Image (cartoon, grey):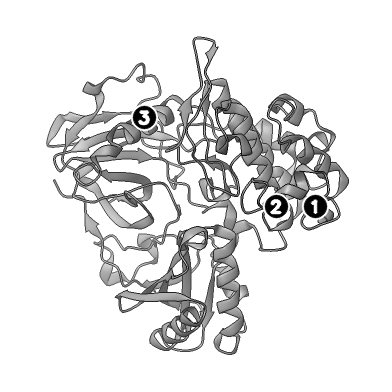
Amino acid sequence: MSVSSSCSSSQQLNITQLAVVRTLGEGAFGEVKLLIDRNDPNIAIAVKIIDLKKHRHQADNVRREALLQRILRHHPNVLKYISMRVNVDEQFQIFLEYADGGELFDRIEPDVGMHPEKAKFYFAQLIDGLEYIHGNGITHRDIKPENLLLTRQDVLKISDFGMATIFRHDGRERYLDTRCGTMPYVAPEVLTGRYRGVPVDIWSSGVVLVAMLVGELPWESPERSTIRFKCWVENKALNRKPWKRIPNSPLSLLKGMLDPDPKNRFTISRILNHPWFEEESEDSAVSITKQRRFNEHISPFSQPTELHSMRNSSEMLNITSDAYGELSDSHIQVGGLPSTSFSQPDNIESLLINHSQLDPTQTNIIHPLQKLARRMTRFCVIVSVQEALASISKICVSSGFQIKRPVPQQIVAVSMCGGKNDLSFIVTMFEMKDIDMGHRMVMADFRRSKGDGLQFKRIFMNVKRKMDDVICKDSYDWLVKQDLLCSEGIKSLKIDCPEEIQPMEE
């Protein structure tokens, strides 16, 4: 969550002071919104909203999701639960930590992957988080890069517990039988009958590791009708893509994690003791030992600990670190949040700008953009907003997408293929003024809304390649300098944003 370093564990937020900045993600049952404190735009949280009037059948599911995430609030590699409430419009709202570094899939280059040591660095955090989750008797059941978020400090956060469940209680483990997950990442036993909770997350994590190492998925589904999976099961895949591109040490680990027999599949203990996992990185920045020590000392309470309305103290959502205990229905607050609707923490990002960086005539209002979160799916162009959108739209249509135009500076591209190739994304244009350089930049920002992250990045790369003649020659360097593609802070930006801030009215 993007919270200023001065925000202590006693920080409080007022509902009446919160403003909806933008939509972070969409899902089948609603949206995820980014909220900021009007008095301090550096304080931000995410809110997931389910409209119970439209989706009453989801009431139990979303409440279970909130309760499970609440149980898991004490680990730095799990997206932190803050509170939950049902407003007068019957909207179930879960307040969550805001991860300002985007999704893991954005760090994965299609058909390339990422640096092996960086993959190990993220994988170590994923295993740390899963060890904690499983230790609490919970299985996630939908581990994939789109559900693994990052902070600007590269701390990985496991998110979206919509498919999670308790598999062990009072020392007794139960078998599960719900078919759920995302097909390329789901374990084969989930599709065939009863299964245990821990091995299915191990399997999914193995597929994530393959994606990080080589930038492609090993199969479309874990079924023998899929040639790639059939070859894997029959031990005939090692001379084929993607396995032949993976070095022997991580390949040995993957063989254990992706054993089709869950009884023989690696446990977390065996993963932690595997030679590849134990190897120290030559790069101290991605040292596994360094990361584990960091996880042991990082504070899990770097967000406001109280969220309440000044109008009625009974509407306080107490989230102090020592005030949890068992949650009953009486703890689910009813009160005045706005009529917004919503789903899973999909694309956690912010497009905000600090007060000090605003035009002096606008310093009394909260600007919709404070920090342009780093993302690889953006570029700057030398043509106007409308010319750029027209070109992008034409390319998308030729690639099989239907184009919608909700606002003048934005398009929504929806795949017309449907099924497993169902993909949609949003392109928003921003006109920015570099105060130091004295000229304007036009940036195209691509955000995945639905579908596979790697396929989305392939589409983006295709668009970028076909737009090459109008992309600024210094686009990459300029975006890097402005912290839009790397770790340095934004410098000297003035942003004209097409979106309006929606106040969190009572």
Q: Residue at x 40, y 75 (%)?
A: 402
Question: How far apart, in angstroms, are the residues tagged by discs 3 and 1?
Answer: 38 Å
Image-quadrant location for residue 49? top left
Q: Of 305 and 425, which appears nearest the observer?
A: 425
Query: Element type at marker 2?
Result: loop
Q: Identify the residue under disc 3.
A: 64
| Image position, residue 170 (x, y; %) | 49, 9
How packed mark 2 is, by other alpha carbons closer than 10 Å (few <14, some 14-19, many 20 or more), is many
- 7 left or right of 63 in image: right
Quadrant of the drawing holding the N terminus:
top left
Q: Is residue 464 shown to the viewer in this render?
A: yes
Query: Element type at marker 1?
Result: helix
On residue 243, the disc is 1
Select label 3 or label 2 by which is in front: 2
Q: Of 113 and 189, which appears nearest the observer?
A: 189
- CB under 8 Å between discs 2 and 1: yes
